[in-house]
Amino acid sequence: MGNKVDFVGIPLDNLSMSETVDRINNSITCKKQIHHCVINAGKVVKMQNDKKLYESVISSDIINADGMSIVWAAKLFGFKIKERVAGIDLMENLVELAHKKKYICFFLGAKEKVVKKTVDHYSKKYSDLEIGGYRNGYFVKHEEKIIIDQIIKSKANLLFVAMSSPKKEIFLNKYKAELKSVNLIMGVGGSFDVISGHVKRAPLFVQKIGLEWFYRLVQEPERMWRRYLIGNVKFIIIILKARFFKS
């Protein structure tokens, strides 16, 4: 489509938050499925050496810029991204939309207590929100079909999958044909951890200056240092090579 731009081989959609929500709502209204994905610096790095992850991402119907690093890097290639559309912010907007439109939501991922707290949070915030079901993200391969059947039977319009990359992308790409009755399928990473209060999100001004990753690093240094410090350097190298050394 005309709004797509080539970001180091990834067909990135240059959409604002409202445009993204409108497109998803239109898909639900038309009873069609839309597969949503976001990219950030870490995912771009992983995609370089993970063919399944790369194929799962580029096969999505909408790919938004989740991180400010993507927004800034895009300027080096001569185009301006309208707006950062973070997965967690989009999920919040879509849950509100579901409340208004009486759409059914299904939440998959995270630890049992985390996904339950996420569901409880939304149930309290929107007393009449229709939740088709929820399931934690700790399962083995032979349980996948059972989970897919559970989602289908819930008659969910929106499926939010809170698992790490590349697990969530590959899972959704693998089963989206079977989940054709679900109008929106999207990965939301660690969003349930934030919504449930398990992890504190960076203040808005920190998000706007692109240091949300550093805020997370300070909270969980042992788990996040390799992902962010080494990953960010690799991302910069990928961008510089694509911009200045592409043959």
Image: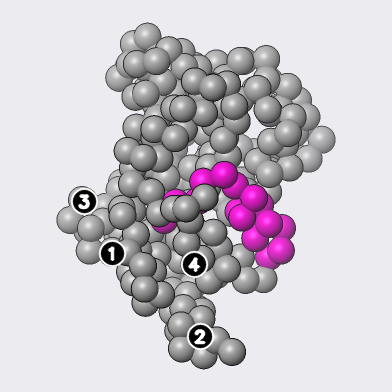
> How would you rate the neighbour count of disc 4 (Cα within 10 Å): few for under 14, some for 14-19, many for 20 or more?
some
Which residue was labeled with disc 4?
A: 7
Region in magenta: 50-66
Q: Is residue 130 above or below residue 61?
A: above
Disc 1 is placed on an element classified as loop
User: Label 2, label 1: how many angstroms apart (C-alpha)?
Assistant: 23 Å
Q: Residue at x 41, y 75 (%)?
A: 77
* Comparing labels 2 and 4, the label whose residue is closer to the camera: 4
Closer-to-camera residue (17/39)? 17
Q: Residue at x 68, y 44 (%)?
A: 173
> How would you rate the neighbour count of disc 3 (Cα within 10 Å): few for under 14, some for 14-19, many for 20 or more?
few
Which residue was labeled with disc 2?
A: 241
User: Label 4, label 3: how many angstroms apart (C-alpha)?
Assistant: 28 Å
- The image quarter containing residue 92 is top left
Sequence order check, earlier mark of 2 and 1: 1
Kind of residue sitting beneath label 4: Phe
Sequence order check, earlier mark of 2 and 4: 4
* Comparing labels 3 and 2, the label whose residue is closer to the camera: 2
* Comparing labels 4 and 3, the label whose residue is closer to the camera: 4
Which residue was labeled with disc 1?
A: 211
Q: How many marks?
A: 4
